[in-house]
Image: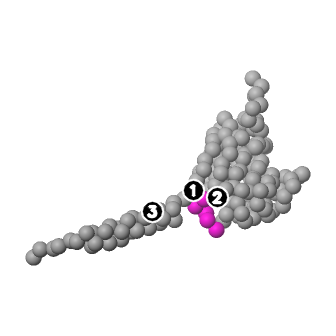
Amino acid sequence: MSTVFSRRSFLKYTAVAAVAVAGTSLLGGCSGAEVSTSTKIGGSNTVLKVKSTLTALDFNATGNTATVTFHLHIENGRWNAIQVGNNNFFIYADDKLYQGIAVSLQPGSASGPQIKRDQEADYLIEIQNVPANVEQLTLTFMPDTQYNEYQSIWILDQETIKGGTELPGEDKAD
């Protein structure tokens, strides 16, 4: 049996194949997560058009435990407003998840718990009873809790944690 392929059939099947290939490239964007990571104070991450910067860290040890306060500056570049509260953050100390995160708006910040398009706000994220000898702290911020695969993460080592509130561009005293 012989199969005859006319020019018209060839063009028709080529067009169908091209559409199929183009369609599969559109599906690729649906399955990926977006995670942005920084390892320093002053480090910025941008996820879902929301830029967040860890501007400072307060590590106050008393005995064997410490209270840690992260200072986070958030700028919303999205069309829709974002809600910022306790559910947007996770804190790990040496890979152990800590509960009881207290999120508050920094005094003098222009925005509230909802940051509208092209607005920004400063937040304090506090956790207590962290071991004073912690070797690594991880702060995770999800700009939109509906899409938890999109995260801004700061992984801070012991040297950075103990260094405290050093901001970018400032020289640390020797």
**Visual colour scheme:** one colour
Mark 2 residue element: loop
Q: What amino acid does circle 1 point to?
A: Glu
- Which residue is the extreme one toward the left? 1
For the residues carrying marks 3 and 2, which lies nearer the camera in this image?
A: 3
Judging by the rendered image, the residue that carries numbered circle 2 is: 48
Q: Which residue is mark 3?
A: 25
Q: Residue at x 76, y 60 (%)?
A: 117
Task: Inspect the image, locate mark 3, and give the three-letter code of the amino acid beneath it.
Answer: Ser
Q: How far across and down, in percent of the image, does residue 172 sit?
A: 75, 28
Sequence order check, earlier mark of 3 and 2? 3
Which of marks 2 and 1 precedes in the sequence? Answer: 1
Mark 3, Cα crowd under 10 Å, few <14 / some 14-19 / many 20+, is few
What's the CA distance linking mark 3 and mark 1?
A: 18 Å
Does 171 appear above or below 5? above
Residue range of the region highlighted in magenta in the rendering = 146-150
Percent position (x, y) of residue 106?
Answer: 84, 52
